[in-house]
Image (spheres, rainbow, N blue to C red):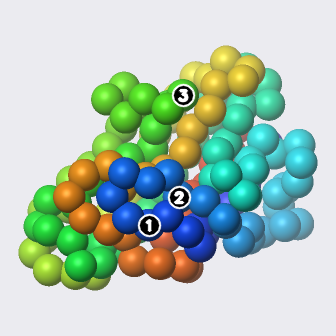
Amino acid sequence: SFFAGYPNGNHGEGNVWNSYTTTEVAGGNSTNSGFNAATGRFTAPKTGCYILTMSGITSSGSSDTRFAIRLNGNTSASHAISDRQTGSYSPTVVSVTWYLQQGDYADCMVYESGNAHGGSWNHFAGVQIA
């Protein structure tokens, strides 16, 4: 499965990104991909190894904006990165390789101290590799 898109909603602190515009339709964005564009949640359609990547740009945040790919709704168990640059418009990328069970889910958010810039400045993508 493969999915890619950018969120149109919920870029503020504590909100899960949602209302995605999906991209690369010919590459596999479909109901089989496990990605729900309305909620921003990827649910593993089958057990296996997945690469998930999110990217974002800070907007009007502090110098410590924290982005995360959450696993099953748990921020503390997921991988996250802090943007340590000062000011707005600093880029951040988080990539993980996770072995997921069928039904495990992942989503993206700013979980502390700031906001992400809206629209196509942010992305969430994934692919099953094994």
Is residue 57 shown above or below 33? below
Among numbered discs 3 and 2, the one appearing first in the sequence: 2
Instruction: Say few, some or many: other residues with alpha carbon within 10 Å of mark 2 (under 14 / 14 to 19 / 20 or more).
Output: many
Residue 12 appears left or right of 65: right
> Where residue 47 sits in the image (x, y, percent)?
73, 20
Q: CA gap, disc 1 to disc 3?
A: 19 Å
Q: Callout 3: few (<14), some (14-19), or many (20+) C-alpha neighbours within 10 Å? A: some
Q: Which residue is pictured at 56% across the width and 69% down the height?
A: 9
Q: Quadrant of residue 93?
A: bottom left
Quarter of image, res 49:
top right
The structure residue drawn at horizontal position 54% and vertical position 28%, both measured from the top left corner, is 72
**Secondary element at tag 2:** loop
**Would you place residue 7 above or below residue 82 in this image?**
below
The answer to the question of whether label 2 and label 1 lie on touching residues, with beta carbons closer than 8 A, is yes
Residue 88: mark in rendering: none
The residue under label 1 is 11
The x, y position of residue 25, in whole percent, is 84, 67
Q: Which residue is mark 2?
A: 17
Name the quadrant containing residue 59: bottom left
Q: Percent from the top left, x then y, of residue 73?
A: 49, 32
Residue type, mark 1 in image: His
Q: Which residue in the protein does label 3 denote?
A: 72
Q: Position of residue 30 (x, y in %)?
A: 88, 54
